């Protein structure tokens, strides 16, 4: 980012080094950039004048960078289990949704990385929006800052980049946000407790494998054959299963974490005995976890009736002897349309 771009950017879009460069360009001491970073990301300051460790004259000079917040909360909904979905308006009037989920004494946040999504998976409401634009690094980080202010008594333990959009199609801003969120003088959330979910962007998986980050990878697989996956997820026509599995294996070798494969259960489509056996034969090649996700309705008229426990039992019988962790994810926030595949906004 050039000096001109930095002087026009929101301060939350700048990392620590860029803030130090900005201070230098303004004729100030570079260490003030570190103070601003800590004020924004560790103390969640909402205005320049809250950063009382900065000289008064500098605070006056920095008023031109306000407002600091990149997101305006439009409304929020709370599910019976305590899950919160927040709708945010961005500076250009577009909107995103973010989900906060309580887990005992901690919380998990499901973050969005794009407004809409270009991939058009058949079981995802976000894809029906089409693609509007990428979020900036600051807009990704600001989702976390909002909930840290809202729930200061509940530490955020895990971040999952599984909200609106395909994270690996917003690669630079994703990586920048991860580094900012894990900074010790910021939110200090461990990268080992961050998971990046992808629909299968093979070049992005390979790039992320070599990035040196400690994040985990989740692959939205949903079918064990190219024929079925082509129908469910059009991105498979560009990056078929063989290429995707090779990239996932490379990531696992570089990173050390087992790869999580997410599998949205579509009764009568991808849960047949034949499909389950094909899935086992595919996954046994990689140290992995298989996360079965009951399909969530993506429109008010959808009605999905299935015995999810019985379906899980059929998968378990096939996978029981394999070194693959098998889990059935219980939907969180489905009552407020905050569960997997349900996020969608109307600008």
Image (cartoon, rainbow, N blue to C red):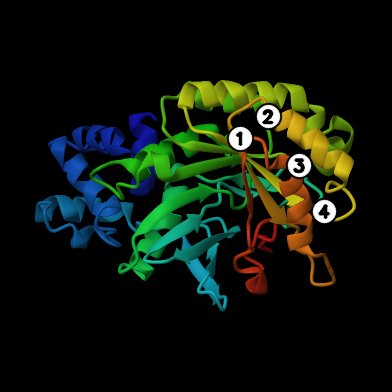
Q: CA distance from mark 1 to mark 3?
A: 12 Å
Camera-side mark, 1 or 4: 1
Q: CA distance from mark 1 to mark 4?
A: 24 Å
Evaluate whether residue 128 shows in this view: no
- Where in the figure is residue 229, as x and y percent of width and height? 83, 37
Q: CA distance from mark 2 to mark 4?
A: 22 Å
Evaluate whether residue 44 shows in this view: yes
Q: Secondary structure at mark 2?
A: loop
Q: Count all numbered tags in the image, as a single digit.
A: 4
Camera-side mark, 2 or 4: 2
The quadrant holding residue 169 is top right
Q: Which residue is mark 1?
A: 323
Q: Secondary structure at mark 1?
A: loop
Q: Secondary structure at mark 4?
A: loop
Contact between marks 2 and 4 (CB within 8 A): the answer is no
Contact between marks 2 and 1 (CB within 8 A): the answer is yes
Q: Which of the pair 127/232 is nearer the observer?
A: 232
Q: Which residue is mark 4?
A: 266
- Where in the figure is residue 132, as x and y percent of width and height? 66, 48
**Mark seen at residue 284:** 2
Judged left or right of residue 255, residue 236 is right
């Amino acid at each position: 980012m050039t000096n001109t771009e930095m002087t026009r950017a929101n301060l939350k879009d700048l990392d620590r080094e860029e803030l130090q460069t900005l201070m230098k360009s303004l004729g100030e001491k570079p260490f003030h950039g570190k103070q601003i970073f800590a004020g924004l990301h560790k103390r969640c300051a909402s205005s320049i004048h809250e950063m009382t460790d900065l000289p008064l004259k500098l605070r006056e000079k920095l008023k031109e960078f306000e407002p600091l917040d990149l997101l305006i909360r439009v409304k929020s909904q709370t599910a019976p289990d305590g899950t919160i979905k927040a709708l945010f308006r961005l500076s250009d009037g577009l909107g995103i949704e973010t989900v906060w989920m309580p887990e005992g004494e901690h919380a998990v946040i499901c973050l969005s990385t794009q407004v809409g999504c270009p991939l058009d998976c058949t079981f995802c409401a976000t894809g029906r929006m089409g693609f509007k634009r990428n979020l900036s690094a600051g807009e990704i980080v600001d989702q976390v800052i909002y909930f840290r202010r809202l729930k200061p008594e509940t530490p955020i333990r895990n971040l999952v980049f599984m909200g609106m959009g395909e994270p690996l199609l917003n690669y630079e801003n994703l990586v920048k946000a991860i580094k900012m969120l894990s900074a010790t003088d910021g939110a200090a959330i461990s990268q080992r407790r961050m998971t990046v979910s992808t629909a299968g962007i093979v070049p992005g998986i390979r790039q992320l494998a070599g990035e040196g980050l400690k994040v985990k990878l989740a692959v939205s697989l949903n079918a064990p054959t190219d024929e079925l996956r082509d129908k469910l997820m059009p991105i498979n026509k560009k990056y078929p299963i063989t290429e995707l599995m090779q990239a996932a294996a490379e990531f696992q070798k570089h990173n050390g974490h087992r790869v999580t494969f997410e599998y949205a259960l579509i009764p009568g489509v991808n849960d047949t005995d034949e499909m389950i056996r094909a899935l086992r034969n595919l996954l046994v090649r990689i140290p992995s976890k298989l996360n079965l996700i009951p399909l969530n309705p993506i429109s008010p008229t959808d009605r999905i009736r299935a015995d999810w426990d019985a379906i899980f039992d059929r998968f378990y019988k096939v996978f029981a002897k394999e070194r693959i962790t098998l889990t059935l994810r219980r939907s969180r926030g489905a009552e407020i349309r905050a569960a997997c595949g349900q996020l969608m906004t109307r600008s």
